[in-house]
Image: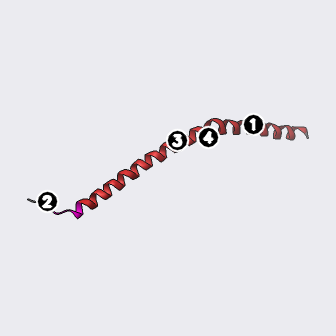
């Protein structure tokens, strides 16, 4: 009866160690990657909005003289 209890305790200890490693190291890396992805997406959005507004300005203006 003690073998299943020891296996469960060992699994719990391994789970706690993995959780501490994940929360300490990998979670920081994950948040850094998410920040970078957010900034890149924001830059793409800014370029898209600028191009869209530029196209509207060109359509509003008069036709170029030939």
SS under mark 1: helix
Q: Earlier in the sequence, mark 4 or mark 1?
A: 1
Callout 4: helix, strand or loop?
A: helix
The residue tagged with tag 2: helix, strand or loop? Answer: loop
Q: CA gap, disc 2 to disc 3?
A: 46 Å
Report the disc number at residue 66: none
Where does the magenta region start and end? 58-62
When asked about the image quadrant of residue 2, the answer is top right
> Which comes before the other along the chain, label 2 or label 1?
1
Depth check, mark 2 against mark 1: the one in front is 2
Mark 3 secondary-structure assignment = helix
Which residue does the numbered mark 1 point to in the structure image? 14
**Quadrant of the image occupied by residue 66:** bottom left
Q: Is residue 65 above or below residue 28?
A: below
- Label 4–label 1 contact, CB within 8 A: no
Q: Which residue is mark 2?
A: 64
What residue do we see at 59% from left, 38% from top? 28
Mark 2 crowdedness (10 Å alpha carbons): few <14, some 14-19, many ≥20: few
C-alpha separation, residue under disc 2 versus residue under disc 4: 56 Å
Main secondary-structure element of the magenta-colored stretch: helix
Q: Give the residue drawn at x 91%, y 41%.
A: 1
Residue 60 is a magenta residue: yes
Residue 3 percent coordinates (x, y): 87, 38
| Mark 3 lies on residue | 33
Q: Is 57 on the left or on the right of 35, as rendered? A: left
């Amino acid at each position: 009866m003690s073998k299943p209890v020891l296996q469960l305790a060992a699994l719990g200890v391994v789970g706690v160690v993995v959780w501490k490693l994940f929360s300490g190291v990998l979670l920081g890396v994950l948040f850094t990657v998410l920040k970078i992805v957010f900034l890149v997406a924001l830059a793409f959005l800014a370029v898209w909005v600028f191009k869209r507004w530029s196209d509207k300005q060109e359509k509003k203006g008069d036709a170029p003289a030939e």
